[in-house]
Image (cartoon, rainbow, N blue to C red):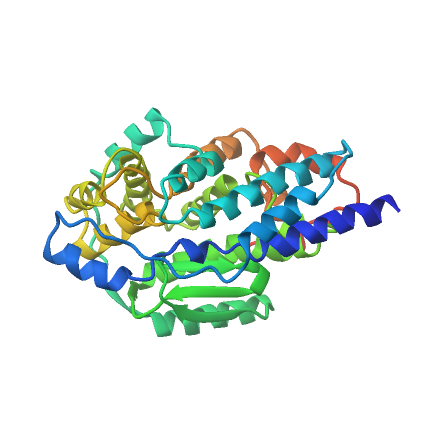
Amino acid sequence: MRLTKLQKIDKELAEIAKQVSFLAINPANVEEEMEKVLANPNYNPQFQYSEFKFDLDYMIKRLNNLKITGDSVIENLFRQKKQVIIKKCLLIKNRGKKDFSDISVKLYGVPDEELVAKAKELLKLKVEKERKIVPSSMVVSQLRRAFKKCGFNWIVKEESIATAANVLQSKKTLLVRKNDVFSKTFVKRLIIHEIGTHVLRAENGRKQPYQLFMIGLPAYLKTEEGLAVLNEDLNGLMTNRVLRNYAARVVAVDMALKGSFSDIYKHLKKYFAKKAAFKLAVRAKRGVADTSKPGGMIKDHVYLQGYYELKKWLEQGGDLKKLYYGKIGLKHVDLLKDIPGLKRPKYLPRF
């Protein structure tokens, strides 16, 4: 009976979490606003957002009514995840409003001074030239082949998104930014980053007794993205260009907390081409309506932050295989032994 009760809680959390898509915080009018920014670097975009198709208030009500009374490791994780999903619902509900930025900070924290200082130094790295010759349609074909090689039946398609790619694990879907062109190195990184990290962890999580391991344990994201970056490094793909890009995300987030879109764009334009600087600024300012005001999606610092944390953990004898039990955080590794019924990871990166 006890297991049945836990499974009911797990199912309820997973059902709601699968409906809370961060694609909802991508502005609907990015292309139009990009033209204005490229024409006038002092212009601050006025972002608009599509209507969210799920009833967020009803989802929050369902979560608040979900009773989790026990004190086992898994129940404590359920309780924490419940609060995370409520915050994500509130985040989407507050798109374009003043509370959006504060909620994103509560979810992901802010970059500390040491990380920001390190990122600013990395921005100065000299980068090698990189030819962008692979259209997004060809990237989709290569990703489909990579999935087939792994034996996974996933959907890969193009879509207008703020990021280069996005994994929707609950829908077994990988999105690639539509009408873009990428370098050959980037495509290799994409396979390592998205399939070799996000997809493998999701597929292992799908085989665990709790869907929580597939949708992500509370505060798993820093480890999730940090591992993806570390895997790029372990595969010899951590070039100065790549490192500088992750550093720019930290700087953009730090600047978004204090200033405007144009502040970020003009600063990053010193190091990147106009469109690249624009895309980085959008990542930091999405979720905001009037980007002349401080605030934004304070999340992108977790890539570099998680990378450094995992690198240190690995140097101290950490076992990367343990991070493939599902979408878990570094702080959950020691808890795995206290959760009955977990299965050893079936899918591990070939590298």
The number of discs equals: 0
Residue furthest to the top: 113
Image coords of residue 9 (percent x, y): 73, 47
Residue 24 quadrant: bottom left
Q: Is residue 333 above or below residue 351?
A: above
Image coords of residue 96 (percent x, y): 35, 48
Asked if one can make out residue 131 in the rendered structure from this viewpoint, the answer is no
Residue furthest to the right: 1
Q: Is residue 96 above or below residue 119?
A: below
Q: Residue at x 24, y 36 (%)?
A: 259
Q: Residue at x 25, y 33 (%)?
A: 120
Q: Is residue 270 above or below residue 313?
A: below
Give the camera-side residue of 214 and 99. Answer: 99
In this rendering, position of residue 11 left or right of residue 172:
right
Residue 328 quadrant: top right
Residue furthest to the left: 40
Image coords of residue 316 (percent x, y): 53, 28
